[in-house]
Image (cartoon, rainbow, N blue to C red):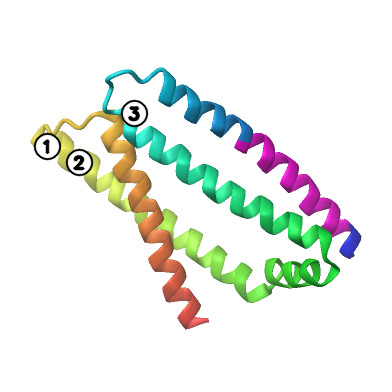
Amino acid sequence: MLEKFRKKIKNKTIITSVILFFAVIMLVFSIVYSGKNTNMESVRGFFTGMILVFIFYILRNIQALRSEEKLKKLYAKLNDERIKYIGKKTSETTLIIILIILSFMSIVFATFNIDFSLRESLLVIIGAIYLIYIISYICYSKKY
C-alpha cells in the first residue's frame, strides 16, 4: 500500500517539476520580452506565485519520499475521508456559486454595455473562484 503511494508521489513530483520548468521559462520570457508593457506585471506575479507553490509541493514530496515517517503522515493526510468529503462539498458549492455569478454578470454586462478587457475579466473570475473556494472550505471544515 505504501509502495504504491510512494510511486504515486514520485510521479506527481516529476510532473510538477516539468510544469515548474515551463513556468520558469514563461517567467523568464515575460521578463525578457515584456519591454515597456505594464500589463505583464500581473503575468509575472502569476508565474512567480505558481513557481513558489510548486517548489513548496516538490520539497514536501521529496521530504516524504526520503522519510518513511513523513510518507506515512502524508498518506494519512491525503487519504483522510473527512478532508476528501470537505473538498468535494467545497468544489460543488464553488461551482454552483461561480455559475450563478457568471450568469448574473453576463446579464448585467449585456444590459448596461459594460466593457472589460479579457484579462481583467479573467482575473476577476479567477480571484472570485479562489475566494469562494476558501470561504466554502472554511465553512465546511467547521461544519464537518
- For residue 111, the mark is 1
Q: Earlier in the sequence, mark 3 or mark 1?
A: 3
Kind of residue at badge 2: Ile
The quadrant where residue 19 appears = top right
Task: Determine the CA span between mark 1 and mark 2.
Answer: 6 Å
Q: Secondary structure at mark 3?
A: helix
- Judge whether residue 12 is colored magenta: yes
The answer to whether mark 1 and mark 2 are in CB contact below 8 A is yes
Task: Determine the CA span between mark 3 and mark 1.
Answer: 31 Å
What residue did someone put label 2 on?
A: 107
Front disc: 2 or 3: 3
In the image, taking residue 97 as reference, residue 65 lies left or right, namely: right
In the image, what residue occupies the spot 49% across and 26% down? 28
In the image, taking residue 41 as reference, residue 80 lies left or right, namely: right
In the image, what residue occupies the spot 68% across and 54% down? 59
Instruction: Tell me residue 58's x, y (percent).
Output: 67, 50
Kind of residue at badge 1: Thr
Instruction: Tell me residue 8's x, y (percent).
Output: 80, 52
Task: Determine the CA span between mark 2 and mark 3.
Answer: 30 Å
Main secondary-structure element of the magenta-colored stretch: helix
Front disc: 3 or 1: 3
Magenta part of the chain: 4-20
Q: Secondary structure at mark 1?
A: helix
In the image, taking residue 70 as reference, residue 77 lies left or right, namely: left
Q: Please say if 22 is above or below 134.
A: above
Instruction: Tell me residue 108's x, y (percent).
Output: 16, 42
Q: For label 2, count other residues whose C-alpha is less than 10 Å away and answer few (under 14), some (14-19) or many (20+).
A: few
- Judge whether residue 22 is colored magenta: no
Q: For label 3, count other residues whose C-alpha is less than 10 Å away and answer few (under 14), some (14-19) or many (20+).
A: some
- For residue 40, the mark is 3
